[in-house]
Image (tube, rainbow, N blue to C red):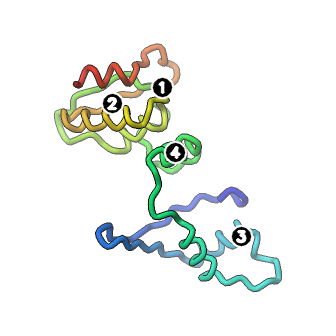
Amino acid sequence: MRNTNVLRKLKMYGNHTKGTFDVYISEEIKAALTNELCLSHTGNIFDFNRFLNQLNSNIPLEITQETKINNLRNNRNIIETLGVIDEVEKTILIGQRHLSIGHPQDKTLRKLYLYTNADPKDIDELIKLLKKFNRTVAWTSEANKENAVDIHKLISSLS
């Protein structure tokens, strides 16, 4: 929340096949949202449920991948604080690695959208190939950026 500088995680429960999703908002979250909107001391009556219904009706049913990726890239600093990106200090792509155990983690692969300037279609292709061959990407810190690789070379090496 930009006005109050508060970051909250909300749990969403849903059913993809039915297309239903619910977010449960505690009194603490409700108070934080009310403060964020500067509505706590206005003297006017604020109907929180009406607000949520209006907010819900304005959420698009579909979001293009281009819009999602642009939002990810534009909000990189916020996303880094959420803990959903693996090894957030490593942002320079240096190659791909074979996994002998397990499978590529999405939190490692989604870094491709944030920290490369590659076309999202190329990233999709690379992720598809990495998963097919049970490989992941390797990252390093900014101090080692001379070891950076081009995403197209990775795609070629896996094709």
| Dot 1 crowding, Cα within 10 Å, few <14, some 14–19, many 20+ | some
User: Disc 3 and disc 4: Cα gap in Å?
Assistant: 26 Å
Residue 130: % across, % down: 26, 34
User: Disc 1 and disc 2: Cα gap in Å?
Assistant: 14 Å
Disc 4 marks a residue whose amino acid type is: Leu
Mark closer to the chain start, 3 or 2: 3
From this view, report whether residue 14 is shown above or below residue 63.
below
Disc 2 marks a residue whose amino acid type is: Val
Q: How many marks?
A: 4
Residue 103 falls left or right of residue 14: left
User: Disc 2 and disc 4: Cα gap in Å?
Assistant: 19 Å
Dot 1 corresponds to which residue? 141
Give the camera-side residue of 54 and 27: 54
Residue 73: % across, % down: 54, 40
User: Disc 3 and disc 2: Cα gap in Å?
Assistant: 41 Å
User: Disc 3 and disc 1: Cα gap in Å?
Assistant: 38 Å
Secondary structure, mark 4, is helix
| Dot 3 crowding, Cα within 10 Å, few <14, some 14–19, many 20+ | some
Secondary structure, mark 1, is loop
Give the camera-side residue of 6 and 61: 61
Q: Which residue corresponds to the image point at 38% horizontal and 73% vertical from the top-left?
A: 20
